[in-house]
Amino acid sequence: MTLIIEPIRGIPIIGPGDVLGEILSTRAADSGWSFDDGDILVLAQKIVSKAEGRLVNLCDVVPSQQALEYAGHTEKDPRFIELVLRESQSVLRVRPGTIIVEHKLGFICANAGIDHSNVNGAWGNAEDWVLLLPEDPDRSARNIQAEILEITGKKIGVMIIDSHGRAWRSGTVGVSIGLAGVPGLVDMRGKTDMFGYQLRVTIIAAADELAAGASLVMGQANEKIPAVVVRGFPYLLRESSLAEVIRPKELDLFR
Amino acid sequence: MTLIIEPIRGIPIIGPGDVLGEILSTRAADSGWSFDDGDILVLAQKIVSKAEGRLVNLCDVVPSQQALEYAGHTEKDPRFIELVLRESQSVLRVRPGTIIVEHKLGFICANAGIDHSNVNGAWGNAEDWVLLLPEDPDRSARNIQAEILEITGKKIGVMIIDSHGRAWRSGTVGVSIGLAGVPGLVDMRGKTDMFGYQLRVTIIAAADELAAGASLVMGQANEKIPAVVVRGFPYLLRESSLAEVIRPKELDLFR
């Protein structure tokens, strides 16, 4: 099936309390997109976090001793590092310019996904405001899914994505951090190819494959295109959560 | 821009000596696709390897002492492990069922990308035939790009992809292993967002984002849809090679 990834244009600047399901279904309709059952809405983390008021002012943060130490190693603001530690379960690597952690949500990423850029600095010094990830991105995705069902009568999948680095490849790619309806993994074990052999690759990270494609359409100035709609996803939607995508610690060879 | 990823249907079983540029431009045309400058053709590694005759019969392989040891740890065929070692620069991890290596081509992957399944077993016992990656996937991609330019007069990008696991996330995603024209990385350093702030994410792995999206359309029975065409890639095509995507060893924190 042809996969179509379509930007939703004209999304206004999002602030705390905005109802994303409403705003996005209106903007999608204005862009000529009529939601159908099985479509997928992919959102950049940033607008979800903003709608949920996940802004923190660094002036309100008192760094711990641990944060001061890591700040020395990373040459980053100790208050920023303090927030990174609060958002994390463990610290994997610390180098000048880099802190890689296991986020409370389970995935491994730099800076616990906390963002300096692009935050609306309406109050005081914009440099002091940072944006945390949504508290529970699966729940955020489910809420938006329910809002769109309410408004349009259509049951779509919703996915929240962020950009992550990789262990051995340069550059960042879009990955899923919250899922509603979009299968994190698709298990092909036991399936055979056209010659009757077992498939070599047996578990596909379908949500992450879509996240990467959607990220491409958002580009990086993703304040401008923070949401896209997808038609032609080749797998059935079902109940899902990010947990299925996180590699269990006992199978992690590279921590 | 809307991103469209379209499967090329009806591709015959590929064998040594087949000219992929010819076959695929014919099949694309029969599917109603008219190549335009800037389109991208994405190919599953498997058909490129087959066209290049990268089949090896395990009966012809004599395992080294090292291969016998790793075969014991991994519970895999020592002859298969011997080929993995020949295709690799170094071994990163060995566990029951798993061998993760640095491929001669520079990337980290399981089994050096060698494939048991889906190989046409016309000669002798099909179980004994395995398929190595193309010898130089960048060159393969450039050759196919040149063939299509010759046939259609259009300058397209060509990318060869495979499915790789990730260090900390379950399931596999499509990644690029050979590039012609498709930028591996897009450098956004110095660019600012709509508020004038420097972007947090500064280098996008654009080829890998597209590889993941294309892999989604190929599905996993990718013998059936081993090639897709893409329109709406948001970055300029330019000369490129896989080397730009490989993280330099001195920046690798997780080896």
Image (tube, coloured by chain):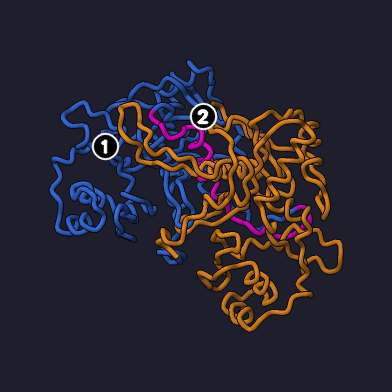
Chain colours: A blue, B orange
Q: How far apart are marks 2 and 1 (CA)?
A: 24 Å
Q: Which residue corresponds to mark 1? A: A54
Q: What residue type is labelled 2?
A: Val
Q: Which of marks 2 and 1 is nearer the N terminus?
A: 1
> Toward the viewer: A54 or B70?
B70
Q: What secondary structure is found at the residue carrying circle 1? A: loop
Q: Where is residue B41 in the image (x, y as percent from the top left)?
A: 67, 39
Q: Which amino acid does label 1 sit on?
A: Arg
The correct choice, above or below, for B153 with respect to A179 in the image is above
Q: In which quarter of the image is the N terminus of chain A?
A: top right
Crowdedness of circle 1 by 10 Å Cα count: few (<14), some, many (20+)?
some
Q: Quadrant of the C terminus of chain A?
A: bottom left
Q: Which mark is residue A229?
A: 2
Is label 2 in contact with label 1 (beta carbons under 8 Å)? no
Task: Name the outermost residue toward the bottom.
Answer: B65
The correct choice, above or below, for B144 with respect to B246 in the image is above
> Toward the viewer: B43 or B150?
B150
At 37% from the left and 36% from the top, the residue drawn is B190
Q: Position of residue B113 (x, y in %)?
A: 63, 61
At 61% from the left and 41% from the top, the residue drawn is B214
Where are the magenta residues, as a range? A194-223
Q: Find out whether residue A209 is within the magenta segment.
A: yes
At 41% from the left and 37% from the top, the residue drawn is A141
Q: Residue B87 carries which label?
A: none
